[in-house]
Every structure is written in structure tokens, then in C-alpha cells.
Amino acid sequence: MSRLQLLKALAPGFLPLLVFIAADALWGTRVGLIVAVASGILEMAISYARNRTWDRFVILDTLLIVAMGGMSLLLENDIFFRLKPAIVELFFCLILGISAFSPLNIMLAMSRRYLKGVAISQEQARAMTRSMRILFFIFLGHAALTAYAAFALSLQAWAFISGGLFYILFAAFFLSEWLRNRWQAKRASAAMPTYADEEWFDLVDVQGKVVGKAPRSLCHARKGLLHPVVHLHILDGRDRLFLQKRSPAKQIQPGKWDTAVGGHARSGEGIEAALKRETAEETGLEGLNAVPVARYVWESDVESELVHMFVARSSRQPRVDPQESSEGKFWKISKIREALGKGILTPNLEFELEILMRQVFGEKDR
């Protein structure tokens, strides 16, 4: 997940505050306060109608607006007017600082709430923390400079620092990220002539959009070359989960139990087509009604995968390919739980089991 995509995902939680900033600048504090609080109440009502629960992030945001608006009305003078942008930024700094430098990751909790259907791996969480630390220092530095300008510089200088400079800093920040991603994709594409005889995979962004392609050997030897794979979990009528034991000859996680189906999408192949092909090849089953459960980035020591995770039910016994797996059987969920953390299951399977417990069996985070 890129920093830009993260901010887009979190924007709904901060919408009332963003509305207050815009309305305050256009129509003044009183009108801005009314408009922003009304937008917060409306957003909470919509959230409750959809999810039957109150959005605590929007509630917190709206209460902050009331506090800020009240202070603005009580301390309506030129200095406080100039300090308001810095106060808003310090609020963001507080949220980012708590999330990036303490065990209480508010931003991660918000992203999980708003990015429904997209799981966040540990590697993504670490990348998000690094991003939040960078944004924390950008906000903090700009807030300090704005406060300095409010007391020591002219109105014109303050206007540029609090407004124009803020957008310049953010534009430079996101431009550097875009250039870095483009450079990685071009570097992978530049290797095309040397790998003409290999199977090729598409390179994608976290939304699955194709941005290039690379050979199998390169994708499996270098982190950052995100390529799509499909995983299918097969349940029987007794809610038992079919697992395959990886062949001892496998280079990665040999001899461990893994998902029923796991394989790469070929270059130019759609996700559903890849799932049907891999399912037929690895289990001999066709015509399953596979339901999408999650999409997430999984990074091992040697590769980066965009995993499209599905679940299906079958009354038929899957077969296993002896070249890929040494054994296959249905497991009771209780037996799988007993095997967690003991080196019996692959780490990727253990990660996906947490998703299955929430999305399929309706269990809360343990």
C-alpha cells in the first residue's frame, strides 16, 4: 500500500476536520463550525445505517472540531488566526506520533476499518509505520515553521508558509514515491532480453493494476517485484479445511502444510482464470464456486506477492500432485489451531487462517 493510497483510505475518518478547515477559510469560523459539525453528524448517521455501529474516529474528529471552533470564537484575534493551521497540524502529529512511536497504532486500526476486504500483512504494517514517521516529521516541522511565521514574519510570508509551502512539501513527498515506484518497474522491465526462455509474471501495484512484467527467476530472487498469485481454501460440509503437505524437495517451506491451492497468475492471465487453472492442476476439482475473501501483499525473504485469497466448499475429495505435495487431507479447525506456531504450517497459511476465522467463521480478533 502506497502512502497516497493510505491517505485516501483514511480520508473518510478525517472528513469533518477537512470540511472545517475549508469552510473556515471560505466563510469564517462560525459558519465553518456549523457546516463541519453537520457533516460529521451526517457521516456518523450514514455509517450507522450501513454498519449498525458508530464510527468512533468520526466522533473524535467532530469533538475536536467543536473544541477548536470554540477556542477560535473565544480567542478571535490575529495571532490565533495565524496559529490555527499549526494547531490543526499538531493534531495530525499527535495521531501520527502515537501510531508510529507507540504500541497503539491508531492509523493502522483506521486503515483496517476503512479498507474492508483488504488484509494488511506485517510487512505492510512496518512500511506504514515508516511512512507515518516521515509524515510525522513533515507535519511537525511545518507546524513549527508556521508558528514561527505567525509571530516573527509578515502576513505575506505567513500566508505562503502556512499554505503554499505545505502543498509544495506534500507534492515533493508523493512525487519522490511515484518516481521510486516507476524506477523499480523500469529496472525490472529492462531485464527482459536476458530472460527470453523463462515464464513471465505481470508486475502489479497493490490494487492489481499491471505496471510491468518480469521473469519467474527474478520475481523469486528480489523483494519489491510485486506479482499476483491465487490461494484457494477448500472446506467440506463439516467445516474441515483441506491442506496439502509441501514436497520435501520444495525450495521454500519444504515439508510444511499449506493451502489447498496456491499458484502464480501467468502474464496476461486474469485472476479467475488463474484460479480455475491452478485448482484443476493441484486438486483435480473443477466447477467450484470460489468466493473472494481478501487481497493482501505478502513479502518473504526473497519475493513480494499480491495474494488473491478465495474460499470454496466441495463434497468431493481433492487429489494431490505428487510432484508438488507429499500428502493432502481435511483438517478439523481445532487441530489446525493446535498446530499454530509449532513449525507445522507455513507462515503464510497461519496468516491466512486469521483472515478465515474473521471473514468466514465470524470470529473476532484474538
Image (cartoon, rainbow, N blue to C red):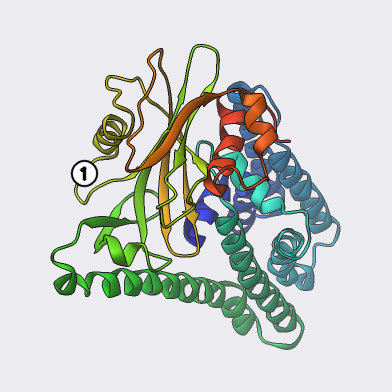
Left or right of 343 in this view: 99: right
Amino acid type of the residue that numbered disc 1 sits on in the rendered structure:
Glu
- In the image, taking residue 311 as reference, residue 53 lies left or right, namely right
Q: As drawn, which residue projects farthest toward the right?
A: 74
User: Which residue occupies the foreground of this view, 135 or 159?
Assistant: 135
The residue positioned 31% from the left and 51% from the top of the image is 209
Q: Nearer the viewer, residue 22 or 165?
A: 165
**Residue 73, horizontal then vertical, whole percent:** 81, 55
Q: Residue 125: tell me if it is visible.
A: yes
Whether residue 298 sits left or right of residue 48 in the image: it is: left
Where, quadrant-wise, is the C terminus in this rendering? top right
Percent across and percent down for residue 200 are 22, 58
User: Is 278 placed left or right of 10 in the picture?
Assistant: left
- Residue 247 in the image: above or below residue 44: below
Residue 16 shows in this picture:
no
Q: Which residue is mark 1?
A: 269
Relative image position of residue 4 (x, y in whole percent): 48, 59
Residue 294 percent location from the top left of the image: 48, 37
- Residue 269, picture quadrant: top left
Considering depth in this image, is 183 or 12 the residue closer to the camera?
A: 183
